[in-house]
Amino acid sequence: MTAQRCVAEGLFEWPSPEPRVQASRCDRCAFITFPAQDACPSCGGDAVTPTLLSRTGTLWTWTRQRFQPKNPPYLGREPAAEFVPYGVGFIELPEGRIEARLAGDVDQELRIGMPMELTVVPFASDEDGTEVLTYAFRPVAES
Amino acid sequence: MDNVAIIGVGRHPFGRFPGVSAIEMAAKAVRLALQDAGITWKDVQFAFGGSYEVDNPDAVVNFLGLTGLPFTDVYNGCATAASALTQAANTLRLGEYDLGMAIGMDKHLPGAFAADPVQYGVPSWYGETGLFLTPKFFAMKIQRYMHDFDISPRTLARVAAKNYRNGALNPDAFRRQTLSEEQILESPMVNDPLTQYMFCSPDEGAAAVVLCRAEIAHRFTSTPVYLKASVVRTRRLGAFEVHSPWLPLERADAPTVDASRAAYAMAGLGPEDVDVVQLQDTDAGAEVIHMAENGFCKDGEQEALLAGGATEIGGSLPINTDGGLIANGEPIGASGLRQVHELVLQLRGTAGDRQVPGTPRVGYSQLYGAPGTAGVAIVST
């Protein structure tokens, strides 16, 4: 089995059957922000408590990243010809709108307002072959 | 405010200049501005110099003369030039000096800007996962805007085609080839809905402006242009901003809106008074959004305004008459002074092939960039 690691400690729950992304809530004004940070961007308070964000929401805006980002800071190390474009969007959750890579084929149909759910995907590999994981959102299969 | 005048402007062409340093380009722009004002470098009592790539813009004195003047270097993202201009104007208002300069220069590598996200207040993973990119932010902002206000891809192509057409009339522009709307729409998709030819590119160049206290402007020129307002603002919580992975549900106006309102108030003017406009067209969508953010139309009216040619040089609301960022590229430190250079030529009536007809009296310029900083300047005769 391929070794895996999360791109950042404390960014999302893993391993988990239903992973959630971690944010922070201000102890003073209850403002929620992502990524979690130790001060509040709303009131400037410096006491916060970790909180988990909802796993489902709707697509608020989107684009497709069709050129390979520069490495660094991007971790992808594949030759330019092997770069696999990916979707990017903001997902509107009950707590706020979160930016995320979109899981699935880059050319899948995307539409503002469509239901989305959280997933965890490998997006790059370390030199020793360890897969690097990040959170992403994918369209919810509509029945 | 009527207490600061612009009496000289100069620019080095924007583009690619192998073997020429940003500081050498700045020296050329300064010489042209000094010549325009009819003064020499030793008459300059202070200067502000802006750049992203150059640590010490003040090193330009090596080519101009080591006069010992106070020279302060500034960097403020895409609003760097607005910051240099604002600081220069405020320095004159303090009353200690009569005449000073704002100078901008840069020399960027080709391709989208790459940097360390940690230096922008966001964690490393944001860059590592391929999210720390400015073009995709602008794409997502216009994607949502097109959805909310019924703007078509054709309108984006019209903006870009206009700016290439204007650039073709400007000998100092980077991109001087006209492109049809079809060529723009059919160029490779970079970040949907924005194609390759809808984006500006980082490049190289310099620009310089000589300012003085308004009451002495007529010693130097019979055609002073007054700096009525120069304002910088940063994002408030709830604004949709570049390099920010979180957007609260409760929205706030963009920093451009805040800067624009403050500038109009300072100038005692409104958008209806403006005759010629320079907007931050990082991409064609940004120009569309910035038309509304700066008060020149309501959200959604851009579709009809572009279709009717309102923003052409001969239209009712000429925008980016020198080709904007799309045709000039963006040497960050110089970009805002390039806008002021163009407005001064337009208000003097010396813009040549791209001169706005009639007698434009009020000019307006706006900058916007990472991580959510905007600058607005208003000038008038």
Image: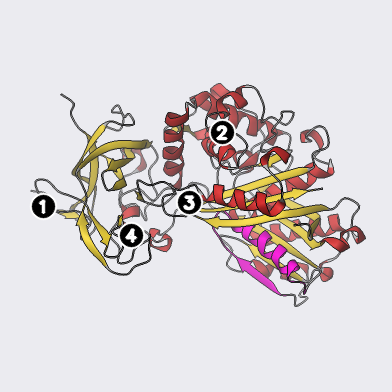
Counting residues from the N terminus, which is met first, the one under dot 4 or under dot 2?
A: 4
Residue at 66% x, 31% y is B311
Q: Chain of mark 3?
A: B
Q: Numbered disc 1: what chain?
A: A
Range covered by the magenta-colored residues: B70-96
Q: How is the image coloured?
A: secondary structure
SS at circle 2: loop
Disc 4 target residue:
B123
Quadrant of residue B229 within the rendered picture = bottom right
What's the residue type where badge 4 is placed?
A: Pro
Q: Is residue B73 left or right of residue A81?
A: right
The reply to whether callout 4 and callout 2 are in contact (CB within 8 Å) is no
Q: Secondary structure at mark 3?
A: loop
Q: Measuring from the top left, give residue B355's x and y in whole percent.
A: 79, 35
Mark 1: few, some, or many residues within 10 Å (few <14, many ≥20)?
few
For the question of whether residue B70 can be seen, the reply is yes
Same chain for labels 4 and 1? Say yes or no.
Answer: no
Label whose residue precedes the other's in the sequence (4 or 3): 3
Q: Are marks 4 and 1 in contact (CB under 8 Å)?
A: no
Asked if residue B331 can be seen in this view, the reply is no
Q: Are marks 3 and 2 on the same chain?
A: yes
Amino acid at pointer 1: Pro
Q: Gap in Å between the C-alphas at discs 4 and 3?
A: 17 Å
In this rendering, the label closer to the viewer, 3 or 1: 1
Q: Disc 2 marks which residue? A: B298
Residue bearing the label numbered 1: A15
For label 1, the SS is loop
